[in-house]
Image (cartoon, rainbow, N blue to C red):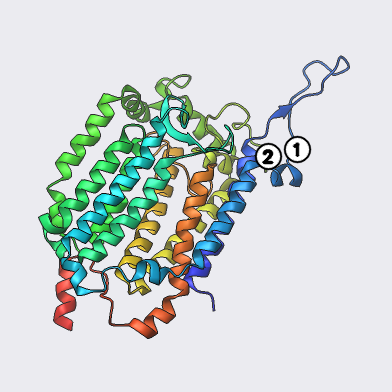
Amino acid sequence: MIRAGHVVALCTLALLMIGVVMVNSAGLGVTGVAGPLAPEGTPLQAAPLSLKSVLFTSATFHMTVALIMMVVVSLLPIRRLIGSAGTSASDQYDVTKAWGGLAFGVIGVLCVLALVYLPGIGQAKNGSHRWINIPGLGEGLSAQPSEIAKWGMLMLIAWYCAVRGPQMKSFFKGLMPALMAIGIVAGFIVIEDLGTGLLITTACCVLLIAGGARFWHFLMFVPFGLAGVAAAVIKSPYRLTRITTFLDPYKDPEGTGYHQVQSLIAIANGQGVGRGLGFGLQSKGYLPEDRTDFLFSVICEELGIPGAAAVIFLFVLLIWAGLSIVKNERSQALKLFALGATVTIGVQAVINLAVVTVVAPTKGIALPLISAGGTGWILTAMSLGLLVAIDRTADHAASSSIGDVPLMRVGPALAEAGSVAA
């Protein structure tokens, strides 16, 4: 019988394979007929895409590592490591354990993020400090600490909500420390990467609400959050330019609107059925960031509607499987992490697709498991491996500890309704 965890693993494998093929296709150069005998005006042709050229690339290496790590993580005794968090009633009133663990986790995440500013390790690209060189592995290999922070914060907030339990209903005892932790980490990330900071904030806030925090407590902070985003946009002129350009990209198609216009041209060039793998034109020097943030445009151009629909279907199937695992899980900590991972991948995919199709302003958010990026592929696959581990051990947990672990509270109203029913 196919379980939700099997679907997660298969969707991850399929998306990574599509990512490897399309990253290599988008990276193809063009060649012409060299020498004096070549007729004048001989058209340039795309370099051939062969099995050898795909297998011996960094994308294939990253995919292999990602799949290995997903398998390793899926075999971990996840319930002994995380699943027992918050199962003891005394834990829910242990303020020192909850707040101390939260503070320790935030400090650890900030230390990782600060590596981008460390001389000799930090690496600046396109004017942004988002990458670090991996010591001992050469200059060509780098990682994004923000990816580590994204998944680390999900696990930290899931653990905190499980440990605090009913105390999450209290603003000062439960919600405020978590909001402060999220604000500090997200604020640090926003300095260099507004999109990732907002993604982390969104996913973590969903976990807080699902973990029992009152929704109206969040409403009090909406004005402050909007003011913070506005300040981050106004402080950086390029962010403001992206918003104004989004409103009318054709006002300056050769300048500020070039990126969005070229993306739309790539999608239109697909003409429904696609030009064929490796035969895209926009990836041959016209479309910027064609292997990373705008890879979906290349998919639309080369594979057409069938290719684009296949990618979207796989994401929908992956999210459905993730939510199925969330629904059936009884451990509060594992349930919340599974929800956070599913929400993060879903929101990130929606943002990328919206940017590529010019439904939203340009933002450096990659398409999960598709866009080129070793750190993103590996950490995302590892997080999905945890979902597989959760589903793999679900039967044992249900038979041995059913009733010992409280079900997830999705809000005060549902919690009260559950107590009445009991």
Residue count near mark 2 (Cα–Cα under 10 Å), binned few <14, some 14–19, many ≥20: many
Percent x, y of residue 163:
24, 65
Name above or below for residue 224 compared with residue 413. Answer: above
At 16% from the left edge and 58% from the top edge, which residue is drawn? 174
Describe the element under mark 2 as helix, strand or loop.
Answer: loop
Name above or below for residue 242 compared with residue 41. Answer: below
Residue kind at label 1, given as amino acid type: Pro
Q: State which quadrant residue 419 falls in.
A: bottom left
Percent x, y of residue 275:
65, 40
Q: State which quadrant residue 1 falls in.
A: bottom right
At 42% from the left edge and 76% from the top edge, which residue is drawn? 394
At 26% from the left edge and 25% from the top edge, which residue is drawn? 235
Residue kind at label 2, given as amino acid type: Gly
Do residues under tags 2 and 1 come within 8 Å of each other at their CB atoms?
yes
Percent x, y of residue 155:
35, 57
View extreme (right): residue = 37
Residue count near mark 1 (Cα–Cα under 10 Å), binned few <14, some 14–19, many ≥20: some
Q: Earlier in the sequence, mark 2 or mark 1?
A: 1
Asked if residue 166 shows in the view, the reply is no
Give the CA distance from mark 2 to mark 1: 8 Å
- Quadrant that contains the C terminus: bottom left
Q: State which quadrant residue 40 falls in.
A: top right
Provide the residue designation for mark 2: 278
Describe the element under mark 1 as helix, strand or loop.
Answer: loop
Provide the residue designation for mark 1: 48
Asked if residue 133 shows in the view, the reply is yes
- Decide which of 243, 415 is in the foreground and name it: 415
At 39% from the left edge and 67% from the top edge, which residue is drawn? 81
Percent x, y of residue 206:
27, 56
Locate residue 151 relative to residue 25 in the image: left or right: left
The label on residue 304 is none
Circle count = 2
